[in-house]
Amino acid sequence: MTDQHTLKDQLQTSDSLAEFLETTDASVNAQAQALIEDRWDREVPHGRAVAIVREELERVTAYDSISRNSSARSPRYMDLTDLELVSGYEFEHILAEILSRVDGEAQVTEASGDQGVDVVWFRESETVGIQAKAYDKQNPVGNSAVQEIYTGATVRNPEYEFDTAAVVTTSQYTNSAREAADNSDVTLYGRKQLQKWLDDAELDADGMGKILAEIR
């Protein structure tokens, strides 16, 4: 069986959860523990991590079965499960790439001066200041993110003139976050919209790997 040190190395060199699972013969529990300790920058219950690993293993198995019956293997496009597993810093860069493929151009702000704005999205009709939140779907985003992006986009950040302040997450939002967004005119983008962007962007494993390689 694969030891924990080897698991850590495999995790660091994998571009997606699927690739990590395909390159190790470790138990589901060991894989889940490696993800908790070495990939997620937040606390995730072990039981939830195990469930995510099992879900992805089932999907990989089904995908491989379909691929073996196809004359050519289609690229595997990234989905929300992949984005739940990246760090906050990685998600910012991946989100910028996704939005650039969908509409206009997006870029990650400088970490030292973003003041709550992680990504700037230059669309044809507007400039959007975004706070990016890569959370597990069981961990909703609270109203502090709304307050931070509102302040960062409308008060503190002199470099850009934002038409819209927004939060983008792999998760969902608490009721208090939605109420705060309504009161401050902040746009909230959750899982449904992010999945649509992912579908339109057609970001595959190779593309995601290049993004991660560039920022490491």
Image (tube, rainbow, N blue to C red):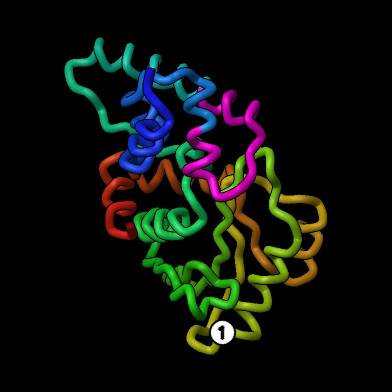
Which residue is painted at 57% across and 46% down in the image?
Answer: 170
Q: Can the viewer see residue 159 in this picture?
A: yes
- Percent across and percent down for residue 127 are 49, 74
**Does residue 115 sit above or below 11 in this rendering?**
below
Foreground of the two, 17 or 12: 12
Residue holding disc 1: 157
Q: Is residue 206 left or right of residue 157?
A: left
Q: Main secondary structure of the magenta part?
A: helix
Against 194, is 34 above or below? above
Residue positioned 64% across, 81% down in the render: 154
| Residue range corresponding to the magenta coloring | 34-53
Q: Nearer the viewer, residue 138 or 47?
A: 47
Location of the C terminus by quadrant is bottom left
Report the side of 47 relative to 27 (left or right). Answer: right
**Quadrant assignment, res 171:** top right
Residue 191, image quadrant: top right
Q: SS class of the residue under badge 1?
A: loop
Residue located at (62% from left, 85% from top): 156
User: Residue 202: x percent and y percent?
Assistant: 34, 43
Specify whether residue 117 is painted magenta. Answer: no
